Image (cartoon, coloured by chain):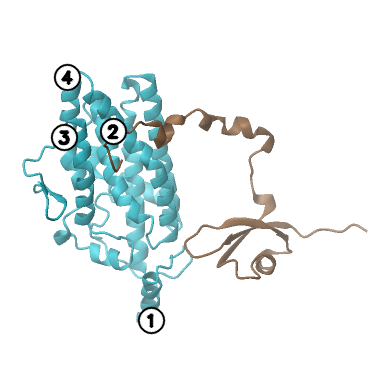
């Protein structure tokens, strides 16, 4: 007997007012409303959240882990992008 | 980065979609007073939404327009190192514009609409970018002074009552410090150079100092829009408070460089611990 799984949803939770939503995990659900209910029951049983986002996992476009080094390489050698690259002479404050 | 004139009076009063009851407004104000963040899907007064759309879009436009004078100097940067740094800064400004457009979009206005309003002149951007950049020292002055003034404006915005704007500003502020330092560094090197180079730095300061002070907007007595923005905790400090803070931290930096502020009335007031400065023209 073949079993058809419910679609997978990724769950994002805002833990408190003012913070952004963060990925918490995933759940299976038959539709969007069920996904929200399941996410609530799975991830916020101890009031871990004030807001939940769910999105179909199949809708997420992700970078390729095998390509991580090459993908992020452009940022590696730009040390001048960090404030610590610049020497602040002694006596200069608030810069 | 650039937040001048963000509290200008709205010339087209809100066309309300649904009547707002005094109870709703009271609940909203209580949330704001309790330092709760307002999120995109929360109920908010239409005027609050419109104020934010105007402020955030104008802030975003300023980031984008601000790239232009700097972009003009890329091919004339004095060294490859300076060119790479300037390129990185300009790329950051584009990023800041994008963070801000995204925050604006959460309020129900499309990016196309925001850009259309910029092109038609309906939406403004910081007028600081209408001043010409005549020499390489101007790129230093922009980083040190214009970004410096922007940082003063932006740090309190990290605590703005509207969540998406506040979070965008946290990102922006983290990246801004490099911008100011690279500007100061450009001027420091010029000031340690030949007499001609130092004169170039002084000339840039002479031309950018007053426009930088104007970035904080009109004086408190003339700024009609401030009170409401303060009550909504979109704004945390008045224009004059922020301007004073900027003067207080920047004057000693100019002294370190051996440059003279173009203000004959500038003096340190021992009693208050603040610099007193001349009237803005």
Quadrant into which the C terminus of chain A falls: top left
For mark 2, name the chain: B
Determine the secondary structure under disc 3.
helix
Check disc 4: other Cα within 10 Å, few if <14, some if 14-19, many if 20+. Answer: few
Residue that label 2 marks: B184
Marks 1/2: CA–CA distance: 51 Å
Q: Is residue B133 left or right of residue B96?
A: left
Name the colour assigned to chain A in the rendering.
brown
- Labelled disc at residue B128: none
- The residue closer to the viewer here, B127 or B216, is B216
Residue of label 3:
B207
What tint does the image give chain B?
A: cyan
Number of the label disc, if any, that sits on residue B23:
1
Labels 3 and 4 positioned on one and the same chain: yes
Closer to the chain start, of discs 2 and 3, is: 2
Secondary structure, mark 1, is helix
For the residues labelled 1 and 3, the Cα–Cα distance comes to: 51 Å
Find residue B142 and report its horizontal and vertical position in percent. Answer: 27, 35
The CA distance from mark 3 to mark 4 is 17 Å
Image mark 4: chain? B
Q: Earlier in the sequence, mark 3 or mark 4?
A: 4
Q: Which residue is mark 4?
A: B196
> For this view, does A24 lie left or right of residue B83?
right
Q: Chain of mark 1?
A: B
């Amino acid at each position: 007997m073949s079993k058809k799984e419910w679609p997978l949803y990724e769950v994002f939770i805002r833990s408190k007012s003012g913070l952004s939503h963060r990925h918490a995990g995933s759940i299976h659900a038959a539709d969007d409303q069920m996904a929200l209910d399941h996410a609530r029951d799975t991830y916020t049983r101890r009031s871990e959240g004030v807001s939940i986002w769910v999105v179909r996992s199949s809708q997420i476009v992700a970078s390729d882990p095998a390509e991580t080094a090459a993908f992020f390489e452009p940022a590696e050698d730009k040390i001048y992008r960090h404030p610590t690259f610049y020497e602040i002479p002694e006596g200069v404050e608030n810069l | 980065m650039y937040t001048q004139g963000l509290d200008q009076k709205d010339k087209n009063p809100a066309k309300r979609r649904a009547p707002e009851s005094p109870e709703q407004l009271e609940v909203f104000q209580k949330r704001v007073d309790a330092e709760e963040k307002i999120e995109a899907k929360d109920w908010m007064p239409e005027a609050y939404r419109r104020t934010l759309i105007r402020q955030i879009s104008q802030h975003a436009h300023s980031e984008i327009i601000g790239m232009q004078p700097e972009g003009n100097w890329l091919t004339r940067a004095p060294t490859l190192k300076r060119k790479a740094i300037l390129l990185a800064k300009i790329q950051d400004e584009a990023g800041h514009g994008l963070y801000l457009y995204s925050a604006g979009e959460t309020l129900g206005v499309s990016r196309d609409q925001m850009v259309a309003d910029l092109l038609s002149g309906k939406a403004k951007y910081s007028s600081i970018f209408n001043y010409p950049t005549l020499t390489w020292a101007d790129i230093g002055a922009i980083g040190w002074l214009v970004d410096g003034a922007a940082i003063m404006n932006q740090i309190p915005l990290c605590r703005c009552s509207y969540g998406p704007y506040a979070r965008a500003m946290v990102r922006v502020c983290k990246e801004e410090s490099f911008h100011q330092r690279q500007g100061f560094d450009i001027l420091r090197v010029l000031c340690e150079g030949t007499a001609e180079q130092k004169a170039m730095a002084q000339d840039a300061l002479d031309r950018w100092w007053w426009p930088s002070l104007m970035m904080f907007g009109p004086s408190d007595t003339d700024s009609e829009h401030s009170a409401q923005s303060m009550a909504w905790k979109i704004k945390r400090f008045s224009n004059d408070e922020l301007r004073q803070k900027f003067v207080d931290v920047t004057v000693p930096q100019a002294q370190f460089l051996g440059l003279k502020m173009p203000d004959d009335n500038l003096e340190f007031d021992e009693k208050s611990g603040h610099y007193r400065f001349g009237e803005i023209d």
